[in-house]
Amino acid sequence: MAGKSLAKDGKALKAVSQGNVNVKPAAVSNSTASGGRFKMDLQMFASSNGSQNKKVLGGKFKDVDATRGVDEVGHHFPQNKFIEQKLHMSRDEGPALLMSKGDHKLTRTYCGRGRRTMIVDEGLSARERMVLDIINIRENFGTKYNQGMLEAIRYAKTLPQFAKKS
């Protein structure tokens, strides 16, 4: 598709809008403005699996954090201190959800509230803490983070620390 104008190629525009290709602006094809407009060609390189730049909304913290934007953060749930101290997992291995930084500050485990939460939640399992965090996120943000939470839960179910107790 390199060299084709998006204005003439509806398929390319649809692929770009769906996030299926990386778009890198090529040189402006006409260096002088024609009627106040530049014609710009775009070079498109489809990623091998179609998800090279796709954000990870939930799952392993390392994967979520690697795709976050400038105003986004990976939110551990349960909180990172519990993951490291009680579950003996690394920060990168814990379940997480991609959130805006502003929303993250409103969660029950953010900063000073996290210290209190560690005390209040003493004796709860990883699954029970995760449920409380999900309830907190749903109360504060409705369904905004549902997809990321589902992905994080799916990941947590693969970890022995989150196994159902018989």
Image (cartoon, grey):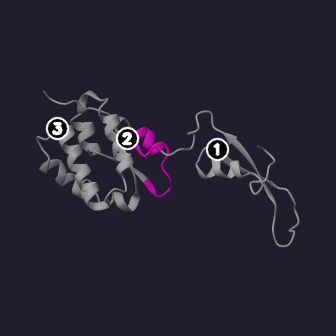
Few, some or many residues within 10 Å of mark 1 (<14, 14–19, 20+): many
Relative image position of residue 141 (x, y in whole percent): 32, 60
Query: From mark 1 to mark 3, how far is it between C-alphas?
Result: 42 Å
Which amino acid lies under the numbered mark 3 shown in the image of this protein? Ser
Vertical position of residue 12 compared to residue 144: above or below: above
Relative image position of residue 83 (x, y in whole percent): 26, 38
Q: Report if residue 9 lies within the magenta region.
A: no
Tag 2's secondary structure? helix
Residue 14 placement, left or right of 149:
right
Vertical position of residue 49 compared to residue 14: above or below: above
Name the residue rendered at 58%, 34% in the picture: 49
Q: Nearer the viewer, residue 73 or 158?
A: 158
Tag 3's secondary structure? loop
Residue range in magenta is 56-72
**Mark 1 or mark 3: whose residue is earlier in sequence:** 1
Label 2 with label 3: CB-CB less than 8 Å: no
Query: From mark 2 to mark 3, how far is it between C-alphas?
Result: 20 Å
Relative image position of residue 46 (x, y in whole percent): 66, 39
Q: Report if residue 64 lies within the magenta region.
A: yes
Image quadrant in which you'd find residue 106: bottom left
Q: Nearer the viewer, residue 10 or 34?
A: 10
Q: Residue 125: which disc?
A: 3
Few, some or many residues within 10 Å of mark 2 (<14, 14–19, 20+): some
On-image quarter of the N terminus = top right
Query: From mark 1 to mark 2, how far is it between C-alphas?
Result: 23 Å
Vertical position of residue 111 compared to residue 130: above or below: below
